[in-house]
Image: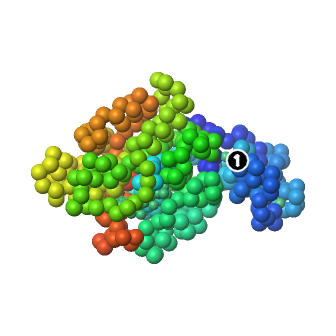
Amino acid sequence: MGRPKCPTCFRELAEPARVLSCEGSCSSESPTEANRLRGWEERVRPPVPVEDGRLSGVCPRCKEPTRQEACAWCLGPIPALWRESQPVVTCIAMAGARSTGKSLYLAVLRGQLELWVTTQHRSHLRAHGDTDRIFDERYRRPLYQQRQMLTSTATIQDDETAQRPLIFSFKEQGGRTRALVLRDVAGEDLEDLASRSHRLEFLRRADGIVALLDPYKVESIREMLRGAYDASGEPGGDGIKVIEQLLDFLSQHREGRHTRVPFAVALSKVDALQELRKVAGTRLSLAMARAGSPLRRDPSMRSPAIDRDDVDLLDAEVRSFITFVDGPGLPNLLREHAERHRFFAVSALGGRPRGDAVPDAGIAPFRVLDPLKWILEEDT
Ligand SMILES: Nc1nc2c(ncn2[C@@H]2O[C@H](COP(=O)(O)OP(=O)(O)OP(=O)(O)O)[C@@H](O)[C@H]2O)c(=O)[nH]1
Ligand SMILES: [Mg+2]
Ligand SMILES: [Zn+2]
Ligand SMILES: [Zn+2]
C-alpha cells in the first residue's frame, strides 16, 4: 500500500493535488486534436491548475469554477473521497481471453459485494463518480432488466471510455475506509497484448488481477462435457496462452523476474464443471461428485476475512484439476513469474444461459467474492 492511486491509470497521485479539470462549458466540447494525439479522446476538459494547494480553481478557458481533481498524468477524475478520507485504494483489473466471463463477473460482483459489506462489515457500499451511470448502462440494464447476456467489451483502441473504472468504497470492520477500483478489460486487447501494450501499462500498476480461465476452452474438458454440456460457438482464443502472455508482460519480459501484482487465476463458469457429476465414470466426474469438494460449496459470504483453510483447499483442488487436464504448464509458469498467486473457481451465473438469455433458474453467483477478498487482504 502506497499513496492513493488514480483509478484510471493506477499511477500514484501527486501530493498535494496539482490539477483540476473543468466542469463548466468546456466539458461538453468535442475532443481536441491535441488530446486525441495523446490518447485522451474522452478527456476533453482542459487541465486547471490548483491554486495555493486548495482543491478549487477557475478554468482558464471558460472562466467557470471547479473543484474536480484530476490525475496529473492522464487527467482522469479523482473522487473527492481520495483526499477527504485517505482510504486504502485497491485497484483491480480483470483479465482473460475473449468470452471468459469477465464482464458478467463484474456485473454480478456488485450485488455480492453489497451483501457482504452490509452483513459482514456492517457498512454500506458507496459508488463514486460515474460508477452508477456506467454500471447501469453497461451491466445492470442488459443483464437484470433485459435479462440478456452482455455484448463483448469494446477494445481500448476503439473506445477508451468503454473501460472506465467502477469505483466503490466502504468502511471495513476495523473502521478503515477502503476504496475499490474495478476495471473491465476487453479479451480482444489481451489476446493482442504485444501490439497494444502501451495502452495496457496500467495492468503493471494494479494491486491485483483477476484472470479468468474458461474451462470450455480446454480441449480435454470440452471432450468430457460433450453431450452433458455443449458450449455453443463462443469466440475467444486460447485462454492459457493469454495468461502466459500477460505474465510475461507483467514480469517485464525478463527471465526469472517475478511480478509483485497479486494474481488470482479463476476458473470461470464452474457451473459447467459441476455438470461433470452427471458424466459417469471419469476421474473428474468422481472428483466433482465428492460431497466435501470446495467446488460444490460457497462459504465466501460468511466472513469478513478470507477463510485460509477453505481457500487453501480450493487452490489445491483447482491446481490439481488444471494439472490433470492440461499438465503442469500453467502452475509452473505462475510459480516462475508471479510472486503471489492463487487458484480460484467462480461462476457468475450459477447455471447455463439459455442462448443469449439468463438461465431459467435465474442468476445465482458462486464464489465470486473469493478472489476479491484475497486481493483485499494482500493489499493492506
Ligand atoms: N455457463 C456459464 N456461462 C457463462 C458464465 N459467465 C459467462 N458465461 C458465458 O460466456 C459469455 C461471455 O461472457 P462475458 O462476461 O461477456 O465475457 P468477457 O470475458 O467479458 O468477454 P470480452 O468482453 O469479449 O472480453 C456469456 O455470454 C455467457 O454465454 C457463467 O458463469 N456460466
Ligand atoms: Mg467483456
Ligand atoms: Zn491517471
Ligand atoms: Zn472550462
Count of numbered marks: 1
Residue 320, quarter of picture: top left
- For image coordinates 52% across by 52% down, the residue present is 188
- For image coordinates 74% across by 48% down, the residue present is 38
Q: Does the beta carbon of the residue at mark 1 sit less than 8 Å from ligand 3?
A: yes
Measured as percent of width and height from the top left, residue 175 is found at: 49, 48
Measured as percent of width and height from the top left, residue 146 is found at: 45, 76
Residue found farthest to the bottom: 146
- For image coordinates 31% across by 73% down, the residue present is 360
Residue 210 higher or lower than 63, as above or below: above
Residue 308 visible in the current orientation: yes
Residue 326 higher or lower than 357, as above or below: above
Residue 15 higher or lower than 146, as above or below: above
Q: In this view of the protein, which residue sits in the foreground, 125 or 108?
A: 108
Instruction: Specify whether 68 is left or right of 125.
Output: right
Q: In this view of the protein, which residue sits in the foreground, 111 or 237?
A: 237
- For image coordinates 68% across by 54% down, the residue present is 77
- Judging from the image, the colouring scheme is rainbow
For label 1, the crowd category at 10 Å Cα-Cα, with few meaning under 14, some 14 to 19 and many 20 or more, is some
Measured as percent of width and height from the top left, residue 323 is found at: 27, 38
Secondary structure found at label 1: loop
Residue 210 visible in the current orientation: no
Q: Which residue type does callout 1 highlight?
A: Cys
Residue 108, quarter of picture: bottom left
Measured as percent of width and height from the top left, residue 277 is found at: 17, 56
Residue 180 higher or lower than 358, as above or below: above
Residue found farthest to the top: 256
Instruction: Specify whether 84 is left or right of 151.
Output: right
The residue that mark 1 highlights is: 74
Q: In this view of the protein, which residue sits in the foreground, 232 or 123?
A: 232
